[in-house]
Image (spheres, helix red, strand yellow):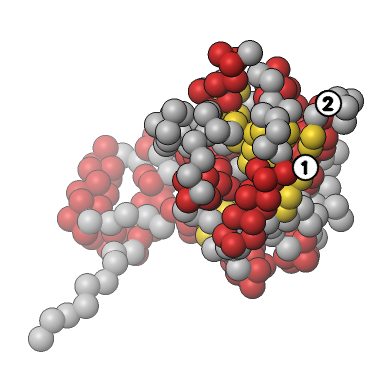
Amino acid sequence: MSTKSTRATISDVAKAANTGKTSVSRYLNGEHQLLSDDLKHRIKQAISDLNYSPSQMARSLKHGRTKLIGLLIADITNPYSIEVMGGVETACRDNGFTLLMCNTNNKPHLEQHYLQLLSSYQVEGIIVNAANMQESAFDCIQHTQIPLTLIDRKVSNYDYDVVGLDNFQGSVDITQHLIDNHYRSLLFISEPLAQVNTRKERLEGFLSVVTPHDEITAEHAEVSLDNSELLHHIIATFIDRNRHQPAAIITANGTLMLLVTKVLHAIKLVWGQDIGLASFDEMNWSSIAGCGITTLQQPTQQIGYSAFQNILTRLKHFENPAQETRFEGRLIVRPSSQALINKN
């Protein structure tokens, strides 16, 4: 018959060392100057013999600090989210914190559940990287004293710190690049705008560039990631309408870019030759897809690290007004948007 092993307690250590729990606690807290050499040796030996390890959670709560940071993301398979998470994790490690990550898998009922769960663990701050997250999910955290930072989105009814890309300028950079390279028909494809400020800002940047140009034909289409049939129709009809002049497509994120490349492959169009293509988000395959795809690279690691730093600042100055931190993207130009240079 097997017996279930039990975890040694501080009382077990005290008994084995023939001392009291107070002395063991002092030893564990580094107050060695209060203990004799003999007592320190006995406690050290008892800890080793019993394979004792103190509960970090219990010790943290005793001192009013858990050193835990919660991260809520919508999709763990999204490369952008993974890179942001890497930045947050690095910041946590550099500052002696532990990261707790929750993946909602884009399911609204999990959003509030995980926020409540993180609150129950008494995390010292929460970072949210979920563009489609329901605003009602924040109700459960609104009246707590837990600092919260949003990655690349805003919530209209709450004043939270925001860290992310300068979406407007990024879209300006991409659009102007295509115009400078002689494309005259432009299609901007995004997921449904809804109340997602990120998508709205990218569309606004696009429109701000094309509107003054009477010679530019500009279109915008919204499509869900799971509606491949609609995406195929949008692209095919755009190409049919604009066969008379150089055309290019801009996608608002890397996931959409992948879906668009599949459609172009299906209708036998080559980006950089038959049509221009540029996108937000530098993917690990962007440089090797066809002739290479022009992208707007986000400083994802820096965004994640900065989000954590916002939490630290908010812990010291909780009542300060909400801050918005925006980083510039880097346009990586590849042949998908340059082919027309050699044709003019």
Rendered view: 157 above or below 299 = below
Residue, x 40% and y 31% (percent of image)?
288
Q: Is residue 264 visible?
A: yes
The residue beneath circle 1 is 219
Query: Foreground: 229 or 36?
Result: 229
Residue type for callout 2? Glu
Residue 24 in percent (x, y) is at: 36, 52
> Spatial distance from mark 1 to mark 2, Cα to Cα?
13 Å
Residue 210 in percent (x, y) is at: 82, 29
User: Residue 315, located in which quarter of the rendered image?
Assistant: top right
Instruction: Give the residue furthest to the bottom.
Output: 1
Residue 151 in percent (x, y) is at: 66, 43
The residue beneath circle 2 is 215
Q: Is residue 17 left or right of residue 113?
A: left
Rendered view: 114 above or below 289 = below
Rendered view: 15 above or below 76 = below
Q: Is residue 2 left or right of residue 51?
A: left
Disc 2 is placed on an element classified as loop
